[in-house]
Image (cartoon, grey):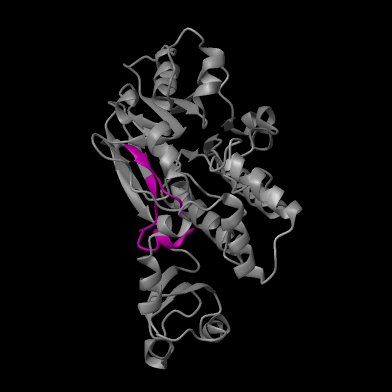
């Protein structure tokens, strides 16, 4: 039995000002080629299928193409929603999809969605756990003591009657930590790590009953705790923090005795994402220019800021995403103690100064009200302020 584990497709995503539709179509076709060449029986898609809750028309067409292509190949698909997905949109048509062996779970409703995959003499029970918050689990399991995400996931698993004599596989989209360390972050999931670190951590040992756990949410491919608990990682590089990632898909082979072999099959993107650093003149010298069609992040070390640096770079590297500087001026700014700048100044004073520097005019009272509302929602300003 062969399973392909993927996740964090983020269909419909852009990189800076660049639309990634063509790159993602290229990726999906590559995944289909791997499914063909490796005789894959099923594909596990571990959430964040779309990049936005309201996906673009191009994103929905790509998913439709990918799922229908797998169905034509008689490859079963098991898919869950992630924190980026809309439950309703991803779940639309799921009952009809099941007739084509496409199984989708987007909401926890008191029990894990389960399907049994059969290939010849081999069987595996596949459980689907979409991204879930502790508050939702409390609604369905009011007797359980749930104070954290870890408590919630343990309660969900404890509530199931899982036969550990069978081969059990879980597809989940959560922040899972190893024995003594967190997974290596990379990409958009690193946003808000303060809340992630305090609230969302789930111990890998809660998955002991499962022979393989196909995880999504973290963009860097890695195992957590034991080799059978893995993040597939995003199949494309979606941020500068992923520039050194070696992207792959996990190919899982399971035999009748529940022996599991994991192979990482490399993925080659249509355009790589690279980070280059140095003086503008040196970086654009003909002898130093390589793979000009790649997505490029640039860090310039020139002491003087260069007018229209982006326009200059895009003449050589048309897919330059972002340019920043690393010189004596930026290093001096980095060493400034922001807390001393704020001092005892009010929120309104700080916002007014910032607005004045950015737009060379005074902020209106209406605009200040918008900023106050946003600050309260973000938890940095309270009514007493």
Near-viewer residue (282 or 78): 282
Give x and y (percent) for residue 273.
45, 67
Q: Is residue 8 left or right of residue 385?
A: left
Q: Is residue 86 magenta?
A: no
Above or below, 81 relative to 321: above
Residue 294: x %, y % from top left: 48, 73
Q: Is residue 367 left or right of residue 169?
A: right
Q: Nearer the viewer, residue 358 or 323?
A: 358
Percent of width and height locating residue 375:
60, 45
- Find out whether residue 243 is within the magenta segment: yes
User: Which residue is painted at 31% across and 47% down in the image?
Assistant: 263
Report whether residue 236 is seen: no
Q: Which residues are magenta?
A: 229-250
User: Could you tell me which residue is drawn at 40 percent across and 73 percent down?
Assistant: 330
Residue name at image x 38 percent, y 60 percent: 337
Quarter holding the C terminus is top right
- Residue 31, compared with residue 156, is above or below; it is below
- The image quadrant of residue 382 is top right
The extreme left residue here reads 180
- Quadrant assignment for the N terminus: top left
Q: How many marks?
A: 0
On the question of residue 181 being in view, the answer is yes
Q: Residue at x 54, y 56 (%)?
A: 29
Outermost residue toward the front?
344
The outermost residue toward the top is 143
Front residue of this view, candidates 381 and 41:
381
Position above or below: 8 against 98: below
Q: Quick one: 328 or 270, which is closer to the camera? A: 328
């Amino acid at each position: 039995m062969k399973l392909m584990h993927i996740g964090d497709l983020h269909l419909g995503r852009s990189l800076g000002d660049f639309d990634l539709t063509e790159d993602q179509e290229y990726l999906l076709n590559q995944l289909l080629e791997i499914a063909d060449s490796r005789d894959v029986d099923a594909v596990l898609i571990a959430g964040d299928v779309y990049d936005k809750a309201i996906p673009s028309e191009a994103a929905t067409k790509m998913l439709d193409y990918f799922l229908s292509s797998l169905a034509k190949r008689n490859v079963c698909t098991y898919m869950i929603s992630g924190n980026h997905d809309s439950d309703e949109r991803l779940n639309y048509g799921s009952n009809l999809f099941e007739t084509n062996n496409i199984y989708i779970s987007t909401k926890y409703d008191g029990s894990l969605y389960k399907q049994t995959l059969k290939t010849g003499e081999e069987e595996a029970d596949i459980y689907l756990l979409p991204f879930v918050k502790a508050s939702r689990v409390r609604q369905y399991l009011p007797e359980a003591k749930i104070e954290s995400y870890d408590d919630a996931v343990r309660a969900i698993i404890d509530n199931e009657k899982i036969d550990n004599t069978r081969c059990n596989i879980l597809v989940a989209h959560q922040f899972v930590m190893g024995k003594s360390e967190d997974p290596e972050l990379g990409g958009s999931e690193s946003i808000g790590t303060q809340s992630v670190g305090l609230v969302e951590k789930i111990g890998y040992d809660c998955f002991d009953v499962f022979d393989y756990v196909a995880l999504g949410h973290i963009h860097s491919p890695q195992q957590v705790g034991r080799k059978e608990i893995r993040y597939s990682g995003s199949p494309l590089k979606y941020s500068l923090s992923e520039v050194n990632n070696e992207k792959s898909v996990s190919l899982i082979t399971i035999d009748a005795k529940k022996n599991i072999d994991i192979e990482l099959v490399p993925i080659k993107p249509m355009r790589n994402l690279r980070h280059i650093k140095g003086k503008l003149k040196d970086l654009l010298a003909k002898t130093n220019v390589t793979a000009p069609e790649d997505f490029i992040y640039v860090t310039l070390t020139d002491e003087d800021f260069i007018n229209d640096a982006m326009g200059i770079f895009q003449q050589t590297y048309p897919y330059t995403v972002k340019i920043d500087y690393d010189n004596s001026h930026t290093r001096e700014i980095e060493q400034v103690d922001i807390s001393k700048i704020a001092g005892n100044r009010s929120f309104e004073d700080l916002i007014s100064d910032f607005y004045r520097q950015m737009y060379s005019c005074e902020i209106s009272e209406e605009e200040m009200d918008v900023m106050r509302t946003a600050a309260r929602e973000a938890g940095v300003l309270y009514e007493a302020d």
